[in-house]
Image (cartoon, rainbow, N blue to C red):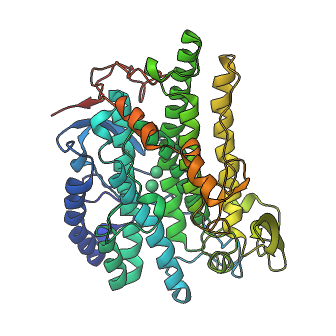
Amino acid sequence: MQVDYNERIPNNVGLADDRRLLRALERWQPAFLDWWRELGPVGALEHEVYLRTAIGVDRDGWAHFDYARMPDYRWGIFLAEPVPERRIGFGIHKGEPAWQELPGEYRAELRRLIVTQGDTEPASVEQQCRLGLSAPSLYDLRNLYQVNVEEGRHLWAMVYLLHAFFGRDGREEADEMLARHAGDADKPRTLEAFNEPIDDWLSFFMYTFFQDRDGKFQLHALSESGFDPLSRTCRFMLTEEAHHMFVGESGVMRIVQRTCEKMREHDTDDVGPFGAIPLALLQKWVNFHYSICLDLFGSEDSTNAANYYAMGLKGRYQESKIDDDHVLADRMATVPALEDGKLVSREVTALKAMNETLRDAFVADSQRGINRFNKVIDHFGIDAALCLPHRAFHRNIGAFAGIHAAPDGTLVDEATWAARHDEWLPSAADRAFVQTLMHPVTEPGAMAGWIAQPRRGIHGQPLDYRYVEFH
Ligand SMILES: [Fe+2]
Ligand SMILES: [Fe+2]
């Protein structure tokens, strides 16, 4: 379907032919813009930003680069092209034609899945809203804003599904997306990790490395859905998510590189006095962001997760590439558990282990990224490595919620946890130190001292391009 870019809401879902839906979305749009002005990027309403905008969903047509003020960004509704005659790939409906309309019997479950995903999108914009005041370069500032507008578009994607398929309660849920706020005492965002303030750029890069990767795996699982509009929405969102993870991974990589350069130059691990971030601090940030993201996958043993899979609503990562019957009726799986104060593994049905299965995929993917960071450290001939902490470390959901574990998985008592907490997680002093490095660098091509230059600019532009024009 053609995309009319001149529409108030650019889309490839035929909005112009559905007056009722169009009117509902046009009523929601001003509330969204008010929310963006109030809780979006601070002090950035008038900036002109070199942004990529989706204008179509086919391979070469969808990315268009130009300057735009963020409130003028064309937040549109884009679904990936339909797969002809698509069939449900797993669960008890396996082999049936994918649902083009909402399956009434799974209405509540689908609404919950869509609302949970949707809530994370504006949450991340809120969490990151002050970062623009301390960007290490125009290149990074532009990437932050690109991520922000795309998270806004992801909200649009979920709000479209709510409005188009759920009627009145869908519209109410869409309104609620703008009523909950990250970190709000009365109306917080649904998931804990989406309430943490992201106040420094090390946290931002760790966030886009780990938390957007959670997004990648959730979107992959939902893109397998038998509810075809959800599947197509998520497939298109994944193209944007890939950029967010690029921002995170290349950002952390550039920090690691600068840290290693300073370690070699001054022959010390303690590079803080030289304006870089010590590896020990990077490790604490990894420990924090990774552990709160593990929680996002939910309990190891989950009836909800089993139902979502059996009903054909949420699949596994790359479901179709897995070599089994995709029904899993009699299969068992082992999940980590806690028994008599010891870490053990326990058998549950494969269906109930679905959260853990998705978490496993996330862990493996995160490890691959960490390995790439360690290659940089290796390249400098430095005998050190970053690592992912044990799954039991710093958990708030699932089997390990009630215990304390060291990063290596050793269980520790309350007193030890309290005494060693600051060795393992960012302390107030660590955060204060990182804050001392956060000064805005706004000259084209210039870069803050704690991070290396990126390899190349955006969309073929040079590194000293004016990626953001301040107004
Ligand atoms: Fe997103
Ligand atoms: Fe994202």
Position of residue 10 relative to residue 437, above or below, is below
Relative image position of residue 287 (x, y in whole percent): 59, 46
Is residue 196 something one can see in this rendering?
Answer: yes
Residue furthest bottom as drawn: 105
Residue at position x 41%, y 66% from top? 119
Of 441 and 112, which appears nearest the observer?
A: 441
In the image, taking residue 362 as reference, residue 446 lies left or right, namely: left
Q: Is residue 113 above or below residue 148?
A: below
- Residue at 74% of width from left, 53% of height from top? 410
Q: Please give the name of the residue rendered at 33% of the width and 71% of the height, measured from the top-left corner.
A: 187
**Which of 271/336 is in front?**
271
Nearer the observer, 42 or 437: 437
Note whether 323 is above or below 253 in the view shown: below
Q: Position of residue 185 (x, y in %)?
A: 32, 67
- Ligand 1: which quarter? bottom left
Furthest toward the top, the residue is: 265
Q: Quadrant of the N terminus?
A: bottom left
